[in-house]
Structures are given as structure tokens and as C-alpha cells.
Image (spheres, rainbow, N blue to C red):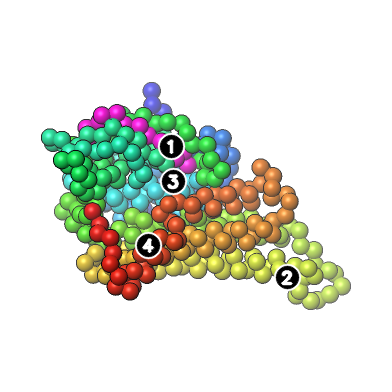
Amino acid sequence: MDTRPVYTLSSKPAVIDSHEEAVERARALRDRLRERLPLGQELRQLPDETVADILESGLYGVMKPARYGGSELGTETMIDVTVELASADPSTGWVYMLWTAHMWMQAMWPEKAMDEMWENPNGLASSVVSTTGDVVAVDGGFSWTGRGFFSSGVDHCNWLTALVPIVRDGERAEMRWLLIPREDFEIIDDWHTLGLRGTGSKTIVLNDIFIPEYRTVTRLAVAGGEAPGREVNTHPMYGAPEPANFTGAMSVPAIGAAVGLVELFRERLSSRIQIPEDTNSPYLPGMSQTLARLAHASATIDSCRALMLLNAQRYARRPVGLVPIEEDMRLRRDTTFTAQQARRAANVLYEESGGSSLSEKSLLQLFWRDTNAAAAHRGLMWDWQSEMWAKAALGLPMPALT
């Protein structure tokens, strides 16, 4: 018997009424997530109890279409919920962000595919965007023998979304998103890492599987706000730019992990500070550098979160056709920038943490590792994302999207 929550939960997820309610539900889970953090590290994937908690709470539904039981609260809510969860357990925040963002992507498929995906109201989909093996056009769909890498949370999911190049007549023709049921692929237990250990971001193997055409959507249709799912999912966010919604929270697990590190650092510092009894001076001898680093790190992380929320407010419901290429690239630039700034803030504080933070049991070390791991995603690399924005801003030639 399959005991994963996606199959054993008998109730439908809650439908959350407001942004405020979603954040409160996330905060209510923080103590439980922190308590289970060591178990997730040991399992190298999220505990079943954590997945069940977040499913039942309705938090995964903030980007899910209302017609399929979601709340359609949008990217601002996804960002704030991710920060709350990641500041308690970065691995939970990482998996939550990816699964929730994919609820937006799944709203792009033809209606028949969405009906199949959400026949189970607790359905979850992991993803792969780094793959091997040709996906070849055949009668009625596509065939694939190959592999996909870094599929976060895949053990708990009953579907997989994969972004792949399609081969037609021996030539690569376009990029497509595929929707693949769990029974069509094998999971390789190869997630042994320095950071984000609890995400279970494993390799998947596919052996001559068939994907019907209706379980696919072209990347161009998604990017253009013209995906077939728009016919039934009419909320404005489903016709808005991909980097404001689908990747609109990519940097936020790093931000949330850095928030957690600041909280831990403050608690530790507060317990060690001794104020001299014979002075009313507000200054503590020898502490100026430590206090300045804490203030700078906290301000940096707050500004990163504010920038991501501002972009979501501006763009997450704006039609794609009203967003110039320079602004689209700015969204991608800012996502990368905030991830790297969060990483730097975490590193600055960790440098002040002393020898005790070298212990494998140190939560400060864990949050430091996880912040850096979250910011190491290929899509968050500053050099090439910043170059793309600069080219767009200067009107230089841009590579064509396929």
C-alpha cells in the first residue's frame, strides 16, 4: 500500500480566503517544521507528516486554479508563505516553492490534462528542466528515453513536469513542457549533498515512455500568455509573465533561509551579551563589528524580500503583451540578484558565528549551508542573467525563444 499523503489523505485541501490567512497558517506550522528538521536531514526528503500538514492547510493551493480547488491568491502570497516555511526549515521552503509554482504551470495545460492531474485533489507534481535523451515526435504525441535531474520532492509526487527539447525529423524544433504520471518513471536515490538535504532532489529515469500530445504545452505558448489552459483558467495571473509567477519566487527559499539564520544569530547573540552594570552607555565594548554585521545582513535580506514582493505586485497579473522585453529581463535579473544578496548576507553573519558553528549539529551552519545551496541553482547565476537584462536594456540582439 502506498502510504504517501498524496494517496492517503481522504479530505480535500482547505481553500484559503486571504493572503493574511495563508501567512498565519504558515506561521502555525513553523514549530512543527523546526522539530522535524533533523528527520528531514536523515531521510534526505521531507517527512510525510510535513507534506500532509501543508497539503491539508491549503498552502499548496495559492497558485492553483479555483476551478480545481485552489485559492488563486497569487505570487505575493507564495513569496510570504515561502519565507515563513524556509525560515523554519529551508528544505521545506524550497520544495514548497517549487511545488506551488508548478501549480501555476499546470494551469497552462489543455483541460483534459488538468482534469487528469487534479482528479486527485491532493495531486502534486515535481519537475525537471535539466534532461538527457531525445524526446521524439511520434503519432499522437512524443516518446522519451532518458533522464531528468534534480527533481525536488519527487518521492512525494504523483506527477512530473519536464521541460524538454522536441526532435522532429531529426532536428530540434521547440521546447515543450510535458506532464508525466509517476508510474512512467523510476527514481534514483542519489541525493547526497552539502545543503538542502531534506529536498530529495533526485534523478529520474524514463525508458521509452509515451506522452500524449494533450499532456504537453509549448514554452512559447506559456511565455506568450496563450497556453490552452487560459481558456478555462481566466484569473489574470495565468496570462501574466512567467518570471513574475512561475519563477517569481525562485530566490525566496534563499531569502527565507537567510531570515532563519538572522533569527538564530540574534537569539545566540542576545544570550551572550553582558551589559556592564557601571555604565549607561548604549555601546558594548568590542561588539561594534558584530552589531553592524547583524544590522546590515538584516537590512539586506529585508530589501531582497521587498523587491520580490514589489515585482510580484507590479507584474504577476499584468498581461504578457503589456510587459516589454527589458522589464521581463528585469524580473529575471532581480530574482537572481536577491538570491545572491541573501547568500552574501548569510555569509557575512556566518563569519561572525565563531568556532561552535562548525559543529555538524549547529543550526547556524545548517541554515548557512542551505542559503548557499538555494542560491546555487543554475537559474540564479548572476553573470548570465545580468547580461541578458543589459542586452535588453541596450537594445542589443537577444536569442530567440523556442
What's under tag 2, amino acid-wise? Ser
Which badge, 1 or 4, is on the more N-terminal residue?
1
Magenta-drawn segment: 199-211
Mark 3 vs mark 1, foreground winner is: 1
Mark 4 vs mark 3, foreground winner is: 4
Q: Name the residue under label 2.
A: 288
- Say which mark, if any, is on residue 202: 1
Q: Residues within 10 Å of mark 2 (few under 14, many from 20)?
A: few
User: How far apart are the two marked residues, 2 and 1, measured between alpha carbons?
Assistant: 44 Å
Which badge, 4 or 3, is on the more N-terminal residue?
3
Is 203 covered by the magenta stretch? yes
Q: What element carries label 1?
A: strand
User: How far apart are the two marked residues, 4 and 3, measured between alpha carbons?
Assistant: 20 Å
Marks 4 and 2: in contact by CB < 8 Å?
no
Q: Mark 3 points at which residue?
A: 95
Which badge, 2 or 3, is on the more N-terminal residue?
3
Q: Could you tell me which residue is drawn at 67 percent across and 70 percent down?
A: 292
Q: Position of residue 222 (x, y in %)?
A: 24, 54
Q: In this view, does 54 lie to the left or right of 194?
A: left
Q: In this view, does 193 lie above or below 350?
A: above
Image quarter for residue 165?
top left
Q: Is residue 368 left or right of residue 281?
A: left
Q: What element carries label 2?
A: helix
Q: Could you tell me which residue is drawn at 65 percent across and 66 percent down?
A: 293
Q: What element carries label 3?
A: helix
Q: Name the residue under label 4.
A: 332
